[in-house]
Image (spheres, helix red, strand yellow):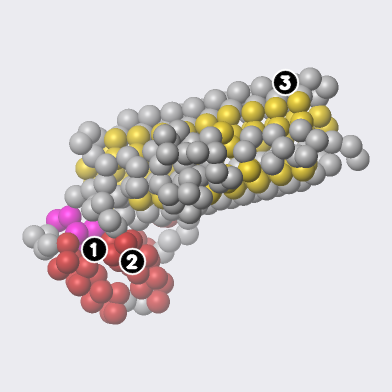
Amino acid sequence: MTTLIHPTALIDPKAELDSSVEVGAYSIIGAHVRIGSGTKIGPHVVIDGHTTIGSDNTFFQFSSIGAAPQDKKYAGEPTRLEIGHRNTIREFCTFNLGTIQDVGVTRLGDDNWMMAYVHLAHDCQIGNHTIFANNAQLAGHVHVGDWAILGGFANVHQFCQIGAHAMIGMSTSLTQDVPPYFTVAGNPAAVHGVNSEGMKRRGFSAAQISAIRAAYKLIYKSDLTMEQAKAALQVESANGDASCVAALELLRSFLDSSTRGIVR
């Protein structure tokens, strides 16, 4: 089976495309690009740089994938962009390469839904099953956990972390980290409770959701300092069942890893 390439597409002879890859009209694929089986590239898409794309992804028209990072320190180093499997990338998305100031690679995991005009800057690390609504924008070095949701026009400052199962409201500007499971919205950003509906949809038990609600109250509704809240969370973890312990440990480890401080 030959590659399904439109005659107006420009594919560098050194690019590696699976025979099942489709490439639309006027798209451009660079020399260092590798694309896995079943991936569909729409018209007018540019994929460049040392970019590796997995299987069964769909790229809609007019996206720029694997371009040089928007970082004045970048001097043409062979940094990378890695995209996993079964992602949907809508119109006008811009995903940049990594930089040598970080791990040298920007990553997008599996089963993510990226709507129009989403920007992933250099060295961002995105997990699996996330949703980025239209115009969600990440600065460099941002980490986003599995199942997180970013509303339209959400903006994230460089080096921020967004935990798994968190939900960020429309037009929210983040300058600090968002712990797992919580919902954040507004300007200035504020936490508005637990993303319980999202947790239910992903199979969390009533006991797990209750444990996270109790943790939320410790962090946000008590007079405890952050260190005191983390100590109290450790006690809660020790007294819960195994599934609740795992949920609470994800939260506690996130709090320990936060370098910018959490939205609080």
In this view, 101 is above or below 204: above
Foreground residue among 141 and 87:
141
Across and down, in percent, residue 132 comes to 46, 38
Amino acid beneath label 1: Ala
Magenta segment's dominant SS is helix
Amino acid beneath label 3: Tyr
Q: Which residue is mark 3?
A: 26
Say if the magenta span includes residue 219: yes
- Left or right: 131 with respect to 33? left
Say if the magenta span includes residue 192: no
- Residue at horizontal 62 percent and vertical 38 percent from the top: 49
Foreground residue among 251 and 95:
95
Q: In the rendered structure, which segment of residues is drawn in magenta?
A: 214-221
Quarter residue 169 falls in: top left
- Residue at horizontal 91 percent and vertical 40 percent from the top: 1
- Residue at horizontal 22 percent and vertical 42 percent from the top: 190
Q: Which residue is mark 1?
A: 214
Across and down, in percent, residue 54 comes to 68, 48
As helix, strand or loop, the secondary structure at mark 1 comes to helix
Q: Residues within 10 Å of mark 2 (few under 14, many from 20)?
A: few
Which residue ends up furthest to the front in the rendered image?
A: 75
Quarter residue 249 falls in: bottom left
Foreground residue among 138 and 223:
138
- Residue at horizontal 84 percent and vertical 42 percent from the top: 19
Q: Which residue is mark 2?
A: 253
